[in-house]
Amino acid sequence: MESVGMTVALLLTLMILSYLIDDTAIYRLAASALVGLSVGYFMAVMLWNVLIPQWRELMTTTDSLRRGLLFLEVGLGVLILARGVPRLGLVGDLGLAVALGIGLGTAGAGALWGTLGPQLMAGAGQGITLGLVATLLALLTAQFYRPPARGRILNPIWTGIQALGRAVWAFALGTLFGSALITGISLLIGRAEFLIQALSQWWR
Amino acid sequence: MFRRVLSAGLLSLIIALTLSPYVWPQPILRQSLTELGSTLLAYAAVVGFFSFLEAHFHRVGARAEGWPYSLVAALTALAFLLLSLAEGALRGNGLAGPWTGWIYRYGLLPLEASIGALLPFFMVLALWRLLRTRRSAYVLLFVAGVLTMLIIHSGGTLLPTLFGSFYETLLSPLATGGIRGILMGVAIGVVVFMVRVFLWLDRPLGR
């Protein structure tokens, strides 16, 4: 089974890497298989890690409070499933409103207590540094605030701040791009190692 | 009208309820809401899965351009799910079976890693095109940022040592500060969006 698997993995790797020669039908077939397998895998994870354990627990639990919560979850889930049927769109909206509300509330709380608070403490906790100035410039360029009136003095100052902020953005995004490039190079090395290993096994 | 008000009102109520355990610690409520959110995401994934299949089979039925790729995508998704259901019926968990494990190990992982391996080529090409089409100080700073990371992580050479003190004094605070500013900007955007939905200024469920 393992040798068949290695051959399949080798073929799929070569199919994807054929994109380096040209955008061929072979590459597109492999890319479509990747999309399909990813969607199927995600669905299987949701089913076996979330939905089925809850349905099983609903059948077996004796705790009435827990059973109530599980009923609520299944009920709201059915409302979301009803959204797939156009005639039942209204009830589907209610389930989606609950899901969206929890998502937005959690994201907002995460942004407030998980990002803004710690980043403010880390940035401003060391006094006025180059890092703090860069943070302020990057934030000002995001244009959450714009001075209401612009005079002869204020206008060039504001334009200068914007230009400096954009420069900070460009450099910071460049470093992020560089980090992603390094990650990609690591993956490329990994694939090259796999190809050498698989091909050398084949020749033996 | 009634539909909109009902959805928006429920949305505001749930946002307030979700935020409350962060202000007034209630671990059970927080845990229950997180569980409810993940469950509803799973149900939404079921709807998404069926609409994925519907869209691709529709393309196949209409013989739209590139329909064989749609057929491959839909069939592989369906086949993986059916296989996991069959293995789950036999073993109790559809993700721990040998066949799904085999497909994951020799199908999904090599495909994902190979697509990732193409990433440097795409990125270098994009950088080259950017340099050819737009020549400004910002583009040069962007390239400087890319080069900084490549130099600092060039293991086995003397470059990180030679470049180290300059990086630590000037470039690292600049990059860290800039990324911190971008992160905080995104966080402020998320909070503002949440507040706008809460106050009914934005209605994501409106039609």
Image (cartoon, coloured by chain):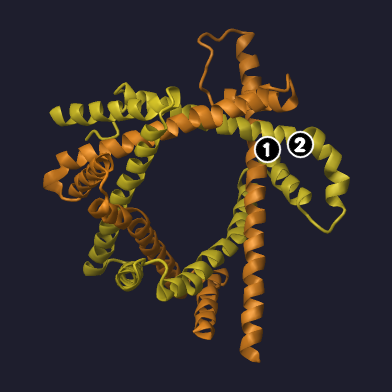
Query: Disc 1 is attached to a residue of which chain?
Result: A
Colour-to-chain, yellow: B
Q: Residues within 10 Å of mark 1 (few under 14, many from 20)?
A: many
Q: CA distance from mark 1 to mark 2?
A: 9 Å
In percent of the image, x 26 and y 39: which residue is there?
A65
Give residue B57's position: percent from left, percent from top: 25, 66
Above-or-below relation of A109 to B151: above
In percent of the image, x 70 and y 39: which residue is there?
B141
Query: Disc 2 is attached to a residue of which chain?
Result: B
Whether label 1 touches label 2, CB < 8 Å: yes
Q: Is residue B47 visible?
A: no
Residue B79: name its quadrant.
bottom left
In percent of the image, x 39 and y 38: which residue is there?
B31
Q: Which residue is mark 1?
A: A171
Locate residue B93 relative to residue B46 in the image: left or right: right
Q: Residues within 10 Å of mark 2 (few under 14, many from 20)?
A: many
The residue type indicated by label 1 comes to: Phe
Above-or-below relation of B201 to A151: below
Above-or-below relation of A35 to A172: below
Secondary element under disc 2, as helix, strand or loop, is helix
Which label number is shown at residue B171?
Answer: 2
Secondary element under disc 1, as helix, strand or loop, is helix
Locate residue B2 relative to residue A177 in the image: left or right: left
The residue type indicated by label 2 comes to: Leu
